[in-house]
Amino acid sequence: MPETTAKIALVCEDDQHKDQAEKLAAQLTIPVLGDMGACDFLLAVTGDRLELRQTDAHAPGPVFVDFTSGALRYRRQFGGGRKEALARAVGLKANRCPSVLDATAGLGRDSFILASLGCRVLLVERSAIIAALLEDGLARAARDPELAAIVARMRIIHADCLTLNHLAPAPDVIYLDPMYPHRSKSALVKKEMRLVRALVGDDSDACLLLDWALSHQGVRVVVKRPQGAPTLDDRKPAFVINGKNSRFDIYLG
């Protein structure tokens, strides 16, 4: 579910971006920092990017969207391309690049990989804060000559898919990657997921999202799940594609 009770403030650390920061704070209806002790999270406008930070002294480091370097660059260049499980799950083939609606966009990594393989992807994110991070990451990636054509195939909207009744044009694939409610600290490997979960909580309505996706006739529905996790709502998929740490349950409309 989107953030509801967390106290969030915005801080601008670069005077050159002060106007941009004030506009963003107004858009998100969050205050510009007055007292750090009074908020749980900070949305920081720096000279380089937009960051989400947790004010808890023991919290993980900042979260930001970066499509230009690190693990995503490596995965784009050496991740297996159309042979990797994600690509096969959405039905990518040599002569077919399906359009994809990513209904739980999060930090946009899987969407970026699909766009890098030629898919047009609509990223739907219901958390306004996460959507702002995505917009910032895409804007920076668009300035990279290597990535401009890829991010041109990605579009973000801030919305809850459960309120989207008519999809026009209809996508070929609806992709769901709901937050999985891990119960052990050892399972929380990535700092980004720890912080995002602290902000938005678990996707307790994941079964409703699956019902919504399956209501669109003729659309392939792909649900990403951790290995060993139960299927959503105990619905049996048409088939399953297994990856290294995750699996993809595929439902055919």
Image (cartoon, helix red, strand yellow):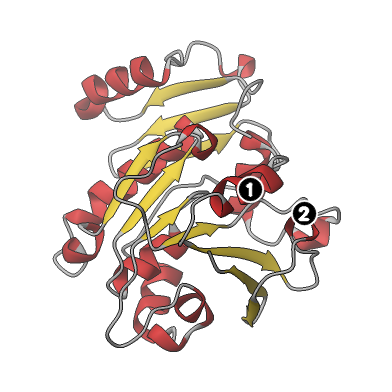
Quadrant assignment, res 73 = bottom left
On the image, the x and y values in percent for residue 75 come to: 42, 77
Q: Residue at x 44, y 47 (%)?
A: 64
Identify whether 117 is placed above or below 201.
Answer: below
Confirm or deny contact between disc 2 and disc 1 (CB under 8 A): yes
Q: Residue at x 46, y 31 (%)?
A: 128
Q: Which mark is residue 233?
A: 2
Q: Nearer the viewer, residue 186 or 109?
A: 109
On the image, the x and y values in percent for residue 83 come to: 45, 88
Q: Is residue 53 visible?
A: yes
Q: Residue at x 54, y 36 (%)?
A: 162
Taking the image as shown, residue 158 lies to the left or right of residue 15, namely: right
Q: Is residue 60 visible?
A: no
Q: Which mark is residue 211?
A: 1
Q: Nearer the viewer, residue 199 or 223?
A: 223
Identify whether 30 is placed above or below 188.
Answer: above
Taking the image as shown, residue 221 lies to the left or right of residue 119, namely: right
- Three-letter amino acid code of the residue under disc 1: Asp
Name the quadrant of the N terminus.
Answer: top right
Q: Residues within 10 Å of mark 2 (few under 14, many from 20)?
A: few
Q: Earlier in the sequence, mark 2 or mark 1?
A: 1
Q: Residue at x 79, y 54 (%)?
A: 182
Identify whether 207 is placed above or below 240.
Answer: above
Taking the image as shown, residue 161 lies to the left or right of residue 195, namely: left
Q: What kind of element bears circle 1?
A: helix
- Three-letter amino acid code of the residue under disc 2: Asp
